[in-house]
């Protein structure tokens, strides 16, 4: 049973998008996250650093051939925080009834 | 802040989460051309084998090997370069569906091939490979649709 817990760090719009993407992946490439969410390299780096410092993600740096490659994954702490945050959002919506669900 | 969040905002956040999950699930999509390519390669190889000409057989095997490596490689490369959807999204139901699909294709095509051979048909393997190809082309996209449904049901969050 997941306990609902609103997480301000995750709820920031850009970070919510990043964490949502990562929650469905084993890992995701920096370029994929950047292009999916529509961020600049520097903006994404900044958000990933915040998530990394919060202990929610792991950042992997490596090479594919000679090209440097960065990828990120949600660790167990981040995954638990995300699941609790989702549960908190679902509770807020459930308490208000189905009328608030956007089409 | 959680208590101060308006329900509309929470609902919008859940929609955003759902859309991001959908982006990842779409990454796991095997495109329709893949099923056509695999079906074509199987039929081509069977026809090459049944031609009984060494040159045609050699070319057929080479095309099959290169074709399989290229098509599968392209799908895998797409995943490696972007992101890998969570392994546990498919769950046993998805694995059973994949194995069931393979079993169904074999259960239909192998007896058909043997029956055609027993009946003295000229190209039994090619004909059964054609049936195999039709099953792959029709069943592959259906299998993907089912797997997507399983993945959507297993991913956390959204409006469920």
Image (tube, coloured by chain):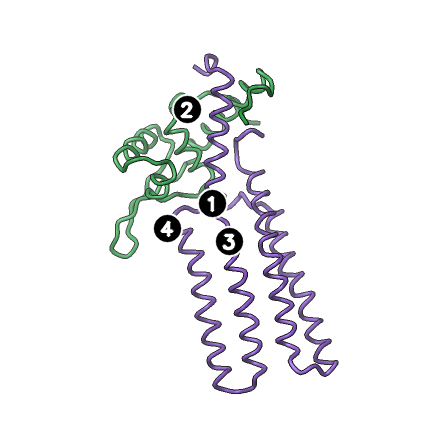
Select label 3 or label 2 by which is in front. 3
Q: Mark 3, chain letter? A: B
In the rendered image, residues at marks 3 and 1 fall on the same chain: yes
Return the residue nearer the eye: B97 or A53: B97
Chain A: give its colour: green
**Residue under pointer 3:** B30
Chain B: give its colour: purple
Q: Mark 2, chain letter? A: A
Q: Which residue is found at the position 46% from the left and 42% from the top? A: B24
Percent x, y of residue B137: 59, 60
In the rendered image, residues at marks 3 and 4 fall on the same chain: yes
Dividing the picture into quadrants, the one containing residue A98 is: top right
The residues tagged by marks 1 and 2 sit, at their Cα atoms, a distance apart of: 22 Å
**Residue under pointer 2:** A11
Q: Is residue B153 left or right of residue B109?
A: left
The residues tagged by marks 3 and 1 sit, at their Cα atoms, a distance apart of: 13 Å
Q: Is residue B143 left or right of residue A5?
A: right
């Amino acid at each position: 049973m997941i306990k609902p817990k609103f997480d301000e760090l995750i709820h920031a719009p850009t970070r919510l998008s990043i964490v949502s993407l990562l929650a469905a992946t084993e890992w995701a490439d920096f370029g994929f996250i950047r292009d999916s969410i529509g961020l600049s390299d520097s903006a994404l780096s900044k958000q990933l650093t915040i998530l990394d410092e919060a202990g929610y993600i792991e950042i992997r740096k490596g090479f594919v051939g000679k090209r440097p490659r960065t990828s990120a994954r949600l660790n167990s702490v981040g995954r638990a925080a995300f699941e609790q945050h989702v549960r908190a959002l679902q509770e807020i919506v459930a308490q208000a009834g189905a009328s608030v669900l956007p089409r | 802040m959680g208590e101060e969040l308006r329900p509309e905002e929470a609902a919008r956040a859940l929609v955003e989460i759902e859309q991001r999950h959908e982006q990842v699930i779409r990454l796991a999509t095997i495109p329709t051309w893949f099923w056509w390519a695999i079906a074509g390669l199987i039929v081509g190889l069977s026809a090459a084998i049944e031609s009984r000409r060494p040159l045609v057989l050699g070319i057929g095997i080479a095309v099959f090997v290169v074709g399989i490596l290229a098509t599968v490689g392209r799908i895998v490369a797409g995943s490696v370069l972007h992101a890998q959807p969570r392994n546990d999204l498919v769950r046993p139901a998805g694995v059973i569906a994949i194995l069931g699909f393979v079993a169904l294709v074999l259960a239909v095509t192998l007896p058909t091939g043997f029956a055609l051979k027993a009946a003295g048909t000229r190209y039994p393997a090619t004909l059964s490979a054609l049936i195999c190809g039709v099953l792959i082309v029709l069943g592959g996209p259906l299998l993907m649709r089912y797997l997507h449904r399983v993945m959507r049901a297993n991913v956390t969050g959204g409006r469920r």
